[in-house]
Image: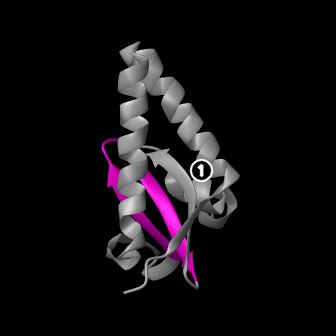
């Protein structure tokens, strides 16, 4: 089995920066915050061996090309191209992630 190479988009990196800030604000502890982000990244990167075991994301019964993996209150959305695993976004589960991933216009008809 080939392990996929992983790449984080600028948006995913920005999302993780925001998560860092949120966790730091709640915990007021830099060690806890670093551990939280390390655990989040470990969870995402654990998917490189078997990325299709993530949860496939469907819209109107069609596969969107995205998979997700859950870590606590967050979902990391990734897609596969060749042997690359691109992490596009890391969002709170309660957020309207379909609008974030695909733009609101697609779903307002």
Residue 20, given in percent of the width and then of the height, sits at: 50, 30
Residue drawn at x 50%, y 49% as measured from the top left: 90
Circle 1 Cα neighbour tier, 10 Å, few/some/many (<14 / 14–19 / ≥20): many
Q: Quadrant of the C terminus?
A: bottom right
Residue reaching furthest top?
28
Residue linked to disc 1 = 12
Note whether residue 93 is visible: no
Location of residue 99 (image quadrant)? bottom right
Q: Secondary structure at mark 1?
A: helix
Q: Is residue 95 left or right of residue 107?
A: left
Q: Nearer the viewer, residue 71 or 44?
A: 44
Location of residue 106 (image quadrant)? bottom right
Q: Nearer the viewer, residue 61 or 84?
A: 84
Q: Is residue 72 magenta?
A: yes
Magenta range:
65-81
Residue 102, given in percent of the width and then of the height, sits at: 63, 63
Residue 2, given in percent of the width and then of the height, sits at: 43, 84
Residue drawn at x 43%, y 77% as measured from the top left: 3
């Amino acid at each position: 089995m080939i392990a996929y190479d992983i790449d984080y988009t600028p948006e995913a990196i920005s999302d993780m920066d925001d998560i860092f800030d949120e966790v730091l604000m709640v915990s007021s502890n830099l060690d806890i915050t670093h551990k939280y982000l390390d655990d989040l990244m470990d969870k995402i990167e654990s998917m490189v061996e078997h990325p299709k075991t993530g949860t496939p994301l469907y819209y109107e019964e069609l596969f969107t090309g995205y998979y997700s993996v859950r870590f606590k209150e967050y979902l990391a959305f990734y897609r596969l191209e060749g042997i690359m695993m691109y992490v596009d976004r890391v969002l709170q589960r309660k957020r309207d992630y379909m609008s974030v991933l695909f733009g609101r216009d697609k779903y307002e008809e």
